[in-house]
Image (tube, helix red, strand yellow):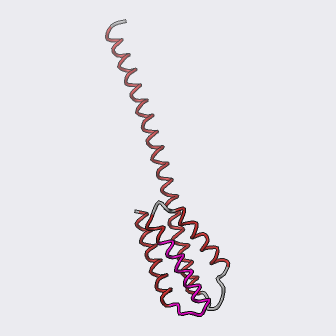
Amino acid sequence: MSNTLVTVLVSASVGSLFSLAGLFVSSWLNEKSEKRRKLWERESERILKVEERAGIIVELCHSQPAGREASSELNGLLGQLHQDVGRLRRYPELSRAIRDVRHWSGCMLYDKLSHHEVTESSKELDAAFNRLRRSSDAALK
C-alpha cells in the first residue's frame, strides 16, 4: 500500500472515532439534561400543589362555622400540609411559611370553636398564606 492510502485510511478511522465519541458525549449530556428537567418539573408541581392545598385550607378556615369541629376534609388537608413541611425542607423559607399557615389555621379553628374573636388569627393566617405564596414563587425561580 502506498503512503497516501495509509494516510487516508488512518485519517478516516480517526475521524470516525472522534465522530462516535462526539455522538456518545452528546447523547450522555442530553440524557442528564432531560433527567434534571424532569426532576425540576416534579419539584415545581409539588410546590404548586402545596400552595394550592394551603389556599384551600385558608378558605375552609374562613368559612368554618363558629362552635363546630373542623371537618375531616380540613383535618386531612392539615395533616398533608404537616407532611409537606418535611418534604420541602430544602426550601427553608417555604417550610417556615407552611408551618405558619398550619399554625394560624389551628389558631383560627380553635378561636372559632371556642367562640373567641378571630380577627387576629384571621389576619395572621392571611399574612402567612401570602408569605407562603412569595416563598413558593421564590423557590420556583
Considering depth in this image, is 1 or 103 the residue closer to the camera?
Answer: 103
Q: Examine the rendered structure and indicate whether residue 10 appears above or below residue 77.
A: above
* Highlighted magenta segment, given as a residue range: 97-118
Q: Residue 59's spot in the image, x, y percent?
A: 55, 82
At 38% from the left edge and 21% from the top edge, which residue is drawn? 12
Q: Residue 24's spot in the image, x, y percent?
A: 45, 34
Considering depth in this image, is 20 or 135 the residue closer to the camera?
Answer: 135
At 50% from the left edge and 59% from the top edge, which residue is drawn? 43
Looking at the rendered image, the quarter that the N terminus falls into is top left
Which image quarter: residue 20?
A: top left
Q: Main secondary structure of the magenta part?
A: helix
Is residue 49 in the magenta section?
Answer: no
Looking at the rendered image, the quarter that the C terminus falls into is bottom left
Q: Residue furthest left?
A: 4
At 59% from the left edge and 89% from the top edge, which residue is drawn? 112
Q: Residue 11's spot in the image, x, y percent?
A: 35, 19
